[in-house]
Image (cartoon, grey):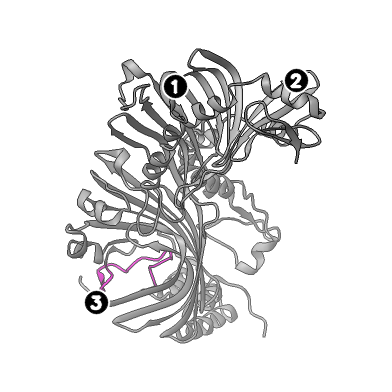
Amino acid sequence: MRRALTPAFIAGLLASPAAARDAVREASLVTRGASDTAGAASEAAREAEPKDLRTDFTAYTRPRGRAAVGPLKLELGIIDEVTLGTYVPPWFAFAVLGTPAPNLYLKARSWWSGPLTLAVRGGFLYLDGSGIAELADADASGSATVLTSEIDASLRLNTRVRVSLGFDYSHLVAVGSGTDVATSIEGASVADTGTARLFAQWQLTRVFGLTFLARYVVFQSPFGADVSTESPGIAISGDLSAGRSSSGTRYAVVPGVSFDWTHWEFYLGVGYGTFQIPAVGLPTTRALPIVDLALAFKFDLF
Amino acid sequence: MRFACFASRSCPRAALALFVHSYRDVDRASGRTYRWPMSSRPLRSLTRSRTRPLGPVVVLGCLVSLGCTEAADIPDVPDLETLRQEYNAPTAGLDGADVRRVLDTFPALERLARALRAADPLIDSVDDARDAANERSGRGVDLRGALTIDLNCPGQEARPSFDEVSNGNLSIDLAVERGVIKQAFWMTARRCLLRAALGSLAFPVELDGPIAIDLGAPIGLRQAWQRDRTLVSLLGTISIDALTLSDVSARYGPRDFEYLQRTEGGSVVLFVSEDGIGLRDRDATWLCERGDGVCGAR
């Protein structure tokens, strides 16, 4: 049977399976009967859209009042379009580094309903000098603030498949003794980093889905690595910069699975490549086996 | 890249506006305009639409350029390849009678060998610079830039005294690229006084002016290095006792020392080895007994 591509029909196609059937049926009736307004179709699409989509690697946000609490991060939907979050492990970093690493991020998505959602996100993480010295290969002093930002675009291809493209940018700001900031963190990473990423999710059932994450380090800027030593009769000074090795791995590929229940969400990806430290946004320069994990309990706070 | 850095300061906002406004999608059938992503036609018909993709390209370009930071400059290093070729392939051809005569034109060969070796401990300070740079490196990180070593010379007395005022100094400028110290570098001596010895006879040495050095192999920051045959070209002067030489070169390893001597017929290489002194010309290697002994082709 041939059907007109009315907004209501399209909304039905793009909605979740159950809602899609209703929407398509409704759209068919609309097609056979009189034409409806675009506003009503848009409303139908909004109703059919799942409200609690995955927020990692996508442009989606938590609905207003929805909190997600997990061992790795906390998120709260301030309004439908704005989510506030923090990574949990850095707060407990004092156990290892002797000092906590406060961090916070804010994510805002586009306000319109449609197949495409755009989002921007900004965040920071602060680490004082003692923490840097613990992490670095070299002695270091001062403190550091990591500023992270990202832009995301998520596209709903159909009711089951969503594809997201994103670009992450992180900048390590040295405070205090700039030249002493380590060039090597977690097996060597440098300051400014830009990473492009592709994330796809194929929802096989309402709960279970397959995911695929691919990441590529577009650039890592050189960072000052000056040296200066002096002993009787000899002085050594160096005007040096550190950069990512040209032979280093730049990509990561992480296939995974996701489970999304009413109150719980769980994601596990296992892959290989350069590992991006989530709160800091800095990728390792070595290729490593990657285990990407997300677990959260969701509930409505207000 | 400098332009990209400059441009990135102002272009993200303009590019974002361009991005939003450029994806204007016109349905040819209905004539209706959709401003993507605010509103959109069905996806399957987007491929037939007219879009102007310049905006996203500009956005991407700006984002890529945001992170660029100036890398440290790598200093110039001397190119001693031509000189090395001359040492490898001398151009003059001598007969047996000429060998001793040519050797006698440079009687200070052994003292020059000792004098230059006296500077070896100073050159070995490259290792200290390597250690210092290595502390700033890490796995997967490439260092680049300049390392400078300033040394006070030990002086001519039996007991070294690293006093810059009385014994002069010497600076070494190393170039670091891709995590490796380049094998060639400039060294500048400022009235640098050393003590050398030939047998039981000690004699003073003074270096002054620029010296080009090639250690024969690059020095990795993270692995042990061993000096190969060192090639030295003194653009300044070296004084050995009362003898002052300028614009001389030498190549030496642990067991031999070579000196390039230019003659009327081309160049030959004089050498000192554990077996005696000798000469290498275009066609043969001649070894001579010490003193006025006879020379024979090897």
Q: Which residue is mark 3?
A: A299
Q: Which residue is mark 2?
A: B263
- In magenta, the rendered stretch is A54-73
Q: Which residue is located at x 43 percent, y 85 percent?
A: A206
Chain for numbered disc 1: B
Q: Is residue A302 magenta?
A: no
Disc nearer the start of the sequence (1/2) = 1
Q: Nearer the viewer, residue B240 or B73?
A: B240
Say whether residue A81 is visible.
Answer: yes
Helix, strand or loop for the magenta stretch, by majority = loop
Where disc 3 sits, the SS reads strand
Q: Quadrant of the C terminus of chain A?
A: bottom left
State the separation of the CA atoms marked 3 and 2: 93 Å
Callout 1 and callout 2 share a chain? yes
Q: Nearer the viewer, residue A85 or A302?
A: A85
Relative to A39, does residue A227 appear above or below in the rendering? Answer: above
Q: Contact (CB < 8 A) between labels 1 and 3?
A: no
Amino acid carrying mark 2 in the image = Thr
Q: Is residue B107 left or right of residue A36?
A: right
Q: Which residue is located at x 49 percent, y 26 percent?
A: B115
Quadrant for residue A293, please give it.
Answer: bottom left
Q: Which residue is mark 1?
A: B203
Callout 1 and callout 3 share a chain? no
